[in-house]
């Protein structure tokens, strides 16, 4: 269990999301979720350069082509 205080201090002193995750032994999604929740409560946590905002867009056409390519009938 990570204390709120430890999370805030680690986040604010880290150079990257990876550093936060390594220091606290948590996954990037968990760290981002926790940071987002803190920001919604008015805690001014910094934002890391290059950090993703939201899920990556899905290329449905590419997925369809991949499914067709690997289909036993090619359809």
Image: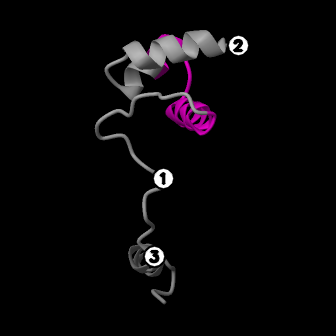
The residue segment tinted magenta is 21-41
Which residue is denoted by mark 3 in the rendering? 60
Residue 5's label in the rendered image is none
> How far apart are the alpha carbons under marks 3 and 1?
17 Å
Tag 1 near tag 2, CB within 8 Å: no
Labels in figure, total: 3
Q: Earlier in the sequence, mark 3 or mark 2?
A: 2
Q: Position of residue 1 (x, y in %)?
A: 70, 13
Colour scheme: one colour
As measured in the structure, the alpha-carbon distance from the residue carrying label 3 to the one carrying label 2 is 39 Å
- Please name whichever residue, 37 or 29, is drawn nearer the observer in this view of the structure: 37
How many C-alpha atoms fall within 10 Å of the one at disc 3: few (<14), some, or many (≥20)? few
The residue sitting at 43% across, 64% down in the picture is 57
Q: Where in the figure is residue 63, as x and y percent of width and height?
A: 45, 73
Judged left or right of residue 70, residue 40 is right
Farthest residue in the right direction? 1
Q: Nearer the viewer, residue 68 or 44?
A: 44
Name which residue lies at 51% across and 80% down. 72
Mark 3 or 1, which is nearer the eye? 1
């Amino acid at each position: 269990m990570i204390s709120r205080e430890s999370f805030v201090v680690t986040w604010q002193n880290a150079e990257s999301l990876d550093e936060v995750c390594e220091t606290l032994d948590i996954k990037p999604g968990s760290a981002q979720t926790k940071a987002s929740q803190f920001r919604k409560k008015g805690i001014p946590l910094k934002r890391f350069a290059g950090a993703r905002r939201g899920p990556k867009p899905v290329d449905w056409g590419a997925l369809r082509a991949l499914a067709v390519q690997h289909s036993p009938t090619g359809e």
